[in-house]
Image: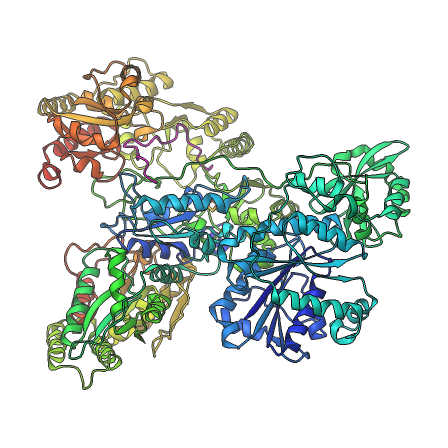
């Protein structure tokens, strides 16, 4: 039996589990805790984030104050009343005071056993607030886990204060459902860029859910007049808006020059501001375009294989078009819930078997042959397009860390990302 | 909105009551959704006049659910069935939960403007899945349907306990709906209600009108509106609607109390049972019939009745079960079956004919009547009711405030999977990600140590990293509808990959374990098809050896070694030496010992050498080598100058080389000595709890590198910081000495709490390095010291020099002292 048929028999799927999304959400709220009902087999999942993808993660602590703890339980021996034990552990965690909010979820076998996490969480009334994240590992993937964990956090936010009218003041905007997968300076720079661009557009960014800040600071989102729902947290955003009574606007990611301008314009309209974008925004856009222009010939008519999450893909394709970069093939690590880009690539694989995906990419020939690989770490380590220059983007990024500002959203992000793409093509850095 | 959940033992008339209540509610002007949560899928039969396709765990949430909601011919009534797998496969409870999730997500009840919802839920199996309507917050009002029979009351009692568990969600028991076999049975049920502190909301009796309605697939309140049943049902419905939260909650009887209630026996009788004397119905006829046929009740097991059957040849334990729940091998009579209980032993088989003849005398009795006989005075002989499961011992939860070790224990011996064996894991996607490489702490990782340069550890790869450990990725649809096909496919694939005579291990994960997936049957089938024995293992025992597994693996490896046998062309084969063989092979080569190059075929590589040099104890491999007649050696680890010389000597000795020179080259000695001089005055520290002293001796700690010895050889001082109570200090100091014979070091520094470590660590200015398997350990950097681990130690003579150079570079590095010392 040769290696190919072996892989055929047990395909290694390009997919990430539900709980990894939950962990990412907890990672993104600096003082949130998560109790996972299950054995210590749940702990290595934290290592897919902490210390590998996110060098600033505080999910695990050498002092033992991990923000993810497990209940050390297995299906056997059966417990006469597992929920009672879980309740007392949760009560202990909630009372500890180390966490401002506590989430609880469980391994699939506990879902099969019918453990009532919602009820157990609701029964904890003292100490930090506790909410359940439904145990949906058997039916959903990491993006749902992320969204549902954020939604659970929104449920726990204190009751909103009445939003007073503020005549003459800038409308306040909360962005909800941002994938803050690490505290490094790609994301902090993204958030700074969004705040800056919103300010230029006559809006005030009061909160980004999540953004690495402590749980209580997320309550500022309830003061917003407009909640902007990003695709990673549709449910969370909807709940935030429902709780505060704010207007809700669903958008994609503000990536690329045109994409960012369109995004800002949509926000202004939804916030009730009249007129087009202020001249300062247009000037920023032009300036970025001017800086990018000399590099664009490097990218023109080249092809990139994308591998990563569908929301990033949805934003990347129009941006690539702006750069005249083709995207002939894509492998996505999750099912698509949002609309696909207007012109999807000719090869689009959802949660594919990585070996099969690599073979399909290798089969792209002629003018469709890609010259660049853009995607997460697994795209490289699984040999999706061996030998191609690689731009590591999205979760996880184990190879590329950001000690300096490296946004990929907004105008600054467009500049930075275009630079990374062109530099990779120029230097020809193949994947490891 | 009126929302009621009906629970009750199967066959008690629950669906009949629930569907008729639905009709009465609809007649009252409400739009009613009737939700069937019974895998039999017949809850809505009378309302629809036909079977409707169930939801059955469809993916797609709310939209797909709407497709499964059907309008009933009864005005104002809509119906949906959760559906479920065939009996004995999959998980019906999960299917119900998934349907209700979809219902909740889509806001079906609100969006469609229902004024009432009636949930009809099977209650024999009180698993959490069947409690989904309560958990999902669909209904707070619970009605338990019961008859007067002990089995039905027993189920009701358990359901009361279940309802109590959900009181935190605002769930309450409205009361009992009694569907009695006989009029006097109502009294039994009333007595039970009093005993558990609830009320009887209403009672219906056996009525031919109901049987007729069922035949016509109509609700009886519509087909026979003037019948006694219809009249009682309407009253029951009013009582249900009027029922509010009881002033004091019901309390389920303990097993003993229940026995006492049913049988009139002694028991502790925590509460008085007013009905015991007058209320127990007479079931003399069935009881007499049972007794005359030689059957006396011995207990209830899993909803089945256990009888001791007295025959002329002796007394045998037998099982009488409802036909629907009977197991293979049982013979059917009426609506029940009979067979010997497994405990009756093989001797019973000879008397099968006599048992059938005796059971034949009970043909006039239906199962309900047999079970009703249990309530006859004196009919209950006090058997113990089995309790499922056993209480789990208290287990600590990982990491919550605990103090992570600086030195990970590692494992004493390797339990590596034999090369060319196949291991398949039947688990879900979470299981697939239960292994990672590297990480912030490395505490949960396979590769804890930091390798210099970092380039060889770019980060985790997409699991399963090892093709020989694939995962099946169980999904919810398989959990609901059964995973037999998936298991079979995976096992067939594993067997095909292993090939004839191969070793295929199939690890059953937690979810399939909970689903009671029959991996054994699948393995037998695949074995018959392919001739490959697929051995079944319990979840996550990949890295552990049971005696049986060790034996199987050793036999497999021995066979492979034997088949690969040829005349050896090399002196040694380095087994499981990881990434370091190039240097070691060159070293051996320089001393005239030839080493096999690592190749694709592990077994052929072994056969090519006269001596197998192991890097770590591995009982399975050792046993396999012994069986195949291959010589092996487990020499000291080749680290440091002395360690490497000892390694060489051991190998040369095993090869019978006389006068072998194992000394380091003089240039290497000189380089080492130069570095050693630089090490004067600096120390490396170890932090450990008192009980961990033995780790320092080696075993699985330090990845088997003799770290303290190599440090001492390099001229670094050794310091020990021990977490111990003052009273344990002397013992701990002695344990350190015992673990490190021949090494000199000052008395350990004791500290009494993890918080108390920083001060003494910081205070010892000679300490530059602190051992930690945790990457950039914050406890070390906060003291201004530099963490190091066995990952920077290189094997061989050149490696010894390089190791010392790295250690000294770290000693000179003041980054942490300058920027992080607190
Ligand atoms: S312990 Fe159970 S849940 Fe955890 S990885 Fe193993 S099989 Fe999966």
Residue drawn at 17 percent across, 82 percent down: A277
Q: How many numbered marks are there?
A: 0
Viewer-side residue, B491 vs B508? B508
Q: Is residue B506 above or below residue B107?
A: above
Q: Quadrant of residue A405?
A: bottom left
Is residue A371 shown to the viewer in this render? no
- Residue B403 included in the magenta stretch of the image: yes
Is residue B481 shown to the viewer in this render? yes
Task: Magenta stretch: give its range.
Answer: B400-418
Q: Residue B48 location, x and y as percent?
A: 69, 74
Q: Quadrant of residue A225?
A: bottom left
Residue drawn at 39 percent across, 70 percent down: A348
Q: Residue B364 location, x and y as percent?
A: 89, 52
Viewer-side residue, B546 vs B142? B142
Q: Main secondary structure of the magenta part?
A: loop
Quarter holding the C terminus of chain B?
top left
Q: Residue B677 location, x and y as percent?
A: 9, 22
Q: Quadrant of residue B144?
A: bottom right
Residue drawn at 59 percent across, 55 percent down: B91
Q: Residue furthest bottom?
A: A275
């Amino acid at each position: 039996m040769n290696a190919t048929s072996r892989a055929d028999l047990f395909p290694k799927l390009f997919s990430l589990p539900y709980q990894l999304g939950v962990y990412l959400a907890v990672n993104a709220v600096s003082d949130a805790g998560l109790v996972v009902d299950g054995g210590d087999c749940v702990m290595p999942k934290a290592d897919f984030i902490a210390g590998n993808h996110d060098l600033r993660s505080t999910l695990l602590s050498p002092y033992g104050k991990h923000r993810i703890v497990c209940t050390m339980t297995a299906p056997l021996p059966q417990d006469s009343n597992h929920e009672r034990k879980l309740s007392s552990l949760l009560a202990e965690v909630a009372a500890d005071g180390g966490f401002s909010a506590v989430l609880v979820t469980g391994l699939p076998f506990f879902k099969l056993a019918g453990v009532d996490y919602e009820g157990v969480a609701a029964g904890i009334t003292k100490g930090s607030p506790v909410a359940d994240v439904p145990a949906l590992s058997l039916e959903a993937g990491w993006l749902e886990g992320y969204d549902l964990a954020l939604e659970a956090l929104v449920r726990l936010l204190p009751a909103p204060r009445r939003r007073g009218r503020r005549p003459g003041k800038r409308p306040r905007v909360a962005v909800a459902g941002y994938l803050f997968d690490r505290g490094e300076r790609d994301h902090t720079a993204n958030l700074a860029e969004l705040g800056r661009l919103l300010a230029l557009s006559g809006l005030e960014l009061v909160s980004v859910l999540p953004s690495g800040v402590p749980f209580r600071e997320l309550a500022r989102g309830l003061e917003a007049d407009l909640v902007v729902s990003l695709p990673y947290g549709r449910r969370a955003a909807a709940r935030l808006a429902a709780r505060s009574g704010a207007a809700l606007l669903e958008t994609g990611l503000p990536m690329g020059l045109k994409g960012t301008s369109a995004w800002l314009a949509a926000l202004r309209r939804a916030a009730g501001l009249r007129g087009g974008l202020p001249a300062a925004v247009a000037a920023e856009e032009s300036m970025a375009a001017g800086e990018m222009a000399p590099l664009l010939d490097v990218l023109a008519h080249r092809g990139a294989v994308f591998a990563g999450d569908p929301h990033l893909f949805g934003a990347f394709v129009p941006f690539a078009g702006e750069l005249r970069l083709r995207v002939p093939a894509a492998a996505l690590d999750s099912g698509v819930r949002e609309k696909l880009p207007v012109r999807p690539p000719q090869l689009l694989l959802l949660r594919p078997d990585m070996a099969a995906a690599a073979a399909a990419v290798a089969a792209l020939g002629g003018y469709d042959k890609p010259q660049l690989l853009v995607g997460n770490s697994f795209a490289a380590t699984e040999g999706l397009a061996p030998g191609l220059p690689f731009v590591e983007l999205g979760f996880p990024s184990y190879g590329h860390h950001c000690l300096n500002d490296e946004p990929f959203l907004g105008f600054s992000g467009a500049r930075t990302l275009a630079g990374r793409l062109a530099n990779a093509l120029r230097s020809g850095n193949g994947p490891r | 909105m009126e929302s009621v959940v009906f629970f009750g033992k199967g066959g008690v008339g629950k669906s009949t009551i629930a569907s008729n209540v639905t009709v009465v509610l609809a007649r009252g002007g409400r739009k009613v959704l009737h939700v069937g949560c019974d895998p039999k899928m017949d809850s809505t039969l009378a309302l629809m006049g036909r079977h409707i396709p169930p939801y059955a765990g469809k993916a797609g949430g709310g939209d797909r659910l709407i497709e499964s909601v059907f309008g009933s011919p009864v005005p104002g009534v809509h119906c949906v069935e959760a559906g479920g797998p065939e009996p004995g496969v999959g998980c019906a409870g999960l299917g119900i939960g998934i349907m209700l999730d979809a219902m909740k997500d889509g806001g079906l009840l609100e969006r469609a403007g229902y004024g009432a919802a009636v949930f009809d839920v099977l209650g024999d199996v009180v698993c959490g899945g069947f409690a989904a309507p309560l958990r999902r917050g669909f209904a707070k009002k619970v009605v338990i349907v019961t008859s007067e029979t002990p089995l039905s009351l027993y189920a009701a009692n358990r359901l009361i306990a279940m309802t109590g568990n959900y009181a935190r969600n605002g769930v309450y028991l409205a009361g009992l709906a009694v569907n009695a076999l006989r009029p006097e049975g109502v009294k039994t049920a009333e007595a039970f209600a009093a005993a558990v502190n609830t009320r009887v909301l209403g009672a219906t009796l056996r009525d031919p009108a109901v049987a007729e309605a069922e035949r016509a697939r109509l609700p009886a309140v519509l087909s026979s509106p003037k019948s006694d049943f219809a009249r009682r049902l309407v009253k029951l419905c009013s009582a249900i609607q009027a029922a509010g939260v009881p002033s004091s909650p019901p309390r389920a009887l303990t097993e003993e109390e229940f026995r006492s209630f049913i049988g009139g026996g002694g028991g502790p009788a925590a509460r008085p049972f007013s009905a015991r004397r007058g209320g127990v119905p007479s079931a003399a006829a069935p009881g007499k019939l049972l007794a005359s046929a030689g059957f006396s009740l011995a207990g209830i097991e899993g909803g089945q009745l256990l009888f001791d059957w007295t025959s002329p040849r002796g007394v045998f334990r037998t099982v009488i079960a409802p036909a629907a729940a009977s197991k293979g091998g049982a013979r059917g009579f009426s609506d029940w079956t009979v067979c010997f209980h497994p405990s009756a032993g093989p001797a019973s088989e000879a008397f099968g004919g006599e048992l059938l003849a005796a059971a034949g005398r009970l043909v006039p009795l239906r199962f309900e009547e047999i079970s009703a006989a249990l309530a006859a005075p004196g009919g209950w002989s006090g058997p113990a009711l089995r309790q499922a499961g056993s209480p789990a011992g208290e287990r600590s939860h990982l990491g919550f405030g605990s103090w992570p070790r600086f030195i990970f224990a590692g494992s004493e011996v390797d339990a590596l999977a034999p090369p060319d064996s196949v291991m398949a894991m039947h688990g879900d996607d979470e299981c697939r990600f239960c292994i990672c490489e590297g990480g912030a702490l490395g505490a949960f990782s396979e590769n804890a140590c930091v390798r210099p340069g970092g380039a060889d550890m770019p980060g985790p790869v997409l699991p399963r990293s090892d093709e020989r450990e694939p995962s099946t990725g169980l999904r919810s649809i398989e959990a609901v509808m059964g995973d037999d096909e998936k298991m079979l496919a995976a096992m067939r694939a594993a067997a095909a990959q292993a090939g004839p005579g191969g070793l295929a291990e199939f690890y059953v994960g937690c979810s399939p374990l909970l689903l009671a997936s029959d991996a054994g049957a699948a393995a037998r089938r695949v074995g018959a098809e392919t001739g490959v024995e697929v051995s079944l293992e319990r979840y996550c025992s990949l890295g552990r050896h049971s005696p049986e597994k060790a034996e199987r693996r050793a036999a497999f490896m021995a066979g492979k070694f034997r088949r690969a046998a040829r005349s050896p062309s090399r002196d040694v084969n380095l087994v499981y030496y990881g990434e370091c063989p190039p240097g070691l092979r060159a070293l051996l080569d320089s001393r005239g010992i030839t080493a096999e190059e690592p190749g694709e075929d592990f077994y052929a590589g072994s056969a090519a050498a006269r001596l197998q040099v192991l890097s770590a104890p591995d009982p399975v491999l050792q046993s396999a080598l012994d069986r195949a007649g291959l010589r092996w050696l487990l020499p000291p680890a080749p680290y440091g100058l002395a360690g490497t010389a000892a390694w060489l000597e051991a190998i040369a000795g095993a090869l019978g080389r006389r006068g072998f020179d194992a000394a380091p080259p003089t240039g290497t000695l000189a380089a080492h000595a130069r570095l050693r001089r630089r090490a004067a005055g600096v120390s490396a520290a170890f932090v450990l709890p008192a009980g961990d002293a033995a780790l320092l001796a080696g075993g699985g700690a330090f990845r088997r590198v003799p770290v303290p010895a190599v440090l001492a050889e390099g001229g670094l001082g050794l310091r020990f910081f021990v977490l111990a109570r003052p009273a344990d200090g002397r013992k701990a100091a002695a344990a350190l000495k015992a673990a490190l014979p021949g090494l000199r070091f000052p008395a350990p520094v004791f500290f009494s709490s993890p918080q108390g470590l920083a001060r003494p660590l910081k205070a010892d200015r000679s300490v530059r390095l602190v051992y930690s398997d945790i990457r950039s350990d914050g406890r070390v950097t906060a003291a201004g010291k530099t963490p190091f681990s066995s990952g920077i130690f290189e094997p061989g003579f050149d490696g010894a020099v390089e190791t010392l150079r790295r250690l000294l570079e770290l000693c000179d590095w003041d980054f942490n002292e300058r920027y992080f010392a607190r």
